Image (cartoon, helix red, strand yellow):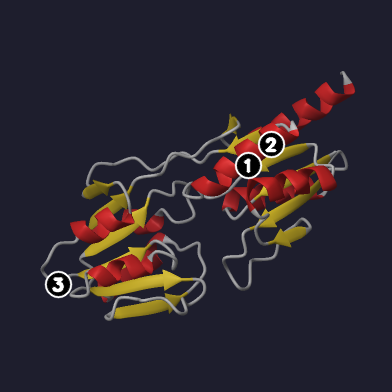
Amino acid sequence: MRVLILGGTTEASALARRLADDTHFEATLSLAGRTAQPAPQALPTRIGGFGGIDGLVRHLRDEKIVAVIDATHPYADQMSAHAVAACGQAAVPLASLVRAPWTRQAGDEWIEVVDTQAAANAIGRNPRRVFLAIGRQELPVFADAPQHHYLARVIDAPAGDALPPNLTLVEARGPFDLAAETALLRDRRIELVVSKNAGGDATYAKIEAARALGVRVIMIARPHKPAGYVTATPEDAVAWLDHVRRSLRGV
């Protein structure tokens, strides 16, 4: 049974590892191509977009895809909308691997905002030392508040964008543990952390470190993300695939 996984998350990689040796499925992992050197994966991998909804419909039909699992990042709302529309048009079952968001814990000092622009506005006028834990694509938004000193951690350095003038880049690939995140915030004298509510364990240590050090977090809310059949873990996604496979065989 041919399966397409829309990936880019730790859950997608975990799902790929589970399916790699499962002879019931012939799975391919699709990555958007936002990093120059993606981490090695357990499945055959395609890189790049599909060309919108119509392109994804063509891909599903040309590759004879029987089921799709959307395991994209919680903020990849456009890709998820395309997946819902394309799978509907192609009559291909779709499951969405939805990671639970982080919730405020005792000791957290969060300022919750609706988007990245609101996060830039929430920093305030007085110069602050800010850790931007949002990836590279939205860094130019903070050029509108050039008075702050920014630290951003990225996998690949941004190029050709109007970046904030007082920006330090750290190129590194996670996950990062609590000790490392605590040292980063302390040594860089960070006063504010700007983060997306990614959920999961891979990047949560920075939130724990901020809590321990009494550093405020500007938390960017998740966008509305269209979904198919909702699963919570890679194991749930495999169980759904098994159900689809048995239903097609009439078992």
Q: Residue at x 38, y 43 (%)?
A: 102
In front of the other: label 2 or label 3?
2
x, y percent for residue 178: 39, 60
What is the x, y in percent for residue 12? Answer: 63, 49
C-alpha distance separating marks 3 and 1: 42 Å
Label 2: how many residues lie within 10 Å, few (<14), some (14-19) or many (20+)?
many
Sequence-wise, the earlier of marks 3 and 1 is 1
As shown in the figure, which amino acid type bears the numbered disc 2?
A: Cys
Residue 32: x and y in percent read: 62, 59
Q: Quadrant of residue 177?
A: bottom left
At label 1, the amino acid type is Ala
Q: In the image, which disc is placed on residue 87?
A: 2
Mark linked to residue 245: none
Three-letter amino acid code of the residue under disc 3: Pro
- Where is mark 3, residue-wise? 127
Horizontally, residue 125 falls left or right of residue 20, namely: left
Q: Residue at x 25, y 61 (%)?
A: 120
Estimate the spatial distance between the alpha carbons at disc 2 and disc 1, rounded to whole Å. 6 Å
Q: Is residue 234 visible?
A: no
Q: Is residue 50 visible?
A: yes
